[in-house]
């Protein structure tokens, strides 16, 4: 599934990806809206670039530490309450 703006619904909806049966359009995919059932042909390159950007954003999100991105060394004195980072 891919989340994309449906031209019929005019909102972001989930779309199912289907291979095209037409050999002359082999570099296109058919997206089917799960809300209204509308079909749309989209170039494969657009889907690949969209998937690549989604994967990059997920990778960036996974790099953020538990404290919201403030990755730092913890001093041994932090356990005693004399931590300079707090």
Image (tube, grey):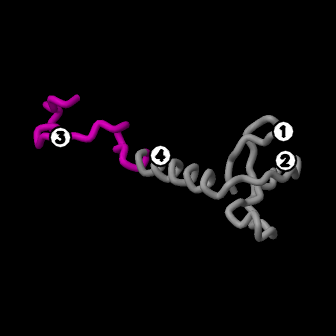
Mark 2 or mark 3, which is nearer to you? 2
- In three-dimensional space, the C-alpha distance between marks 4 and 1, rounded to whole angstroms, equals 26 Å
Is mark 4 in CB contact (under 8 Å) with mark 1? no
Question: Which residues make up the magenta segment?
Answer: 61-86
Q: In terms of secondary structure, where does tag 2 sit? A: loop
Dot 1 crowding, Cα within 10 Å, few <14, some 14–19, many 20+: few
The mark that comes first in sequence, 3 or 1, is 1
Residue 79 magenta-highlighted? yes
Q: Gap in Å between the C-alphas at discs 3 and 1?
A: 55 Å
Secondary structure of the residue carrying numbered label 1: loop
Please identify, in this view, whether the residue under mark 3 or under mark 1 is nearer the observer: 1
Q: Distance from label 2 to label 3 (Cα)?
A: 54 Å
Residue identifier under label 1:
9
The residue under the point 69% across, 57% down is 1
Q: Which mark is residue 57?
A: 4
Name the foreground residue: 77 vs 30: 30
Q: Are marks 1 and 2 in contact (CB under 8 Å)?
A: yes
């Amino acid at each position: 599934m891919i989340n994309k703006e449906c031209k019929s619904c005019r909102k972001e909806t989930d779309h199912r990806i289907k291979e095209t049966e037409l050999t002359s359009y082999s570099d296109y995919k058919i997206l089917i809206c799960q809300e209204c059932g509308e079909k749309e042909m989209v170039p494969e390159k657009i889907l690949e670039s969209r998937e690549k950007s989604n994967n990059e954003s997920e990778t960036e999100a996974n790099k953020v530490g538990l404290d919201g991105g403030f990755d730092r060394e913890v001093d041994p004195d932090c356990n005693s309450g004399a931590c300079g980072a707090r």
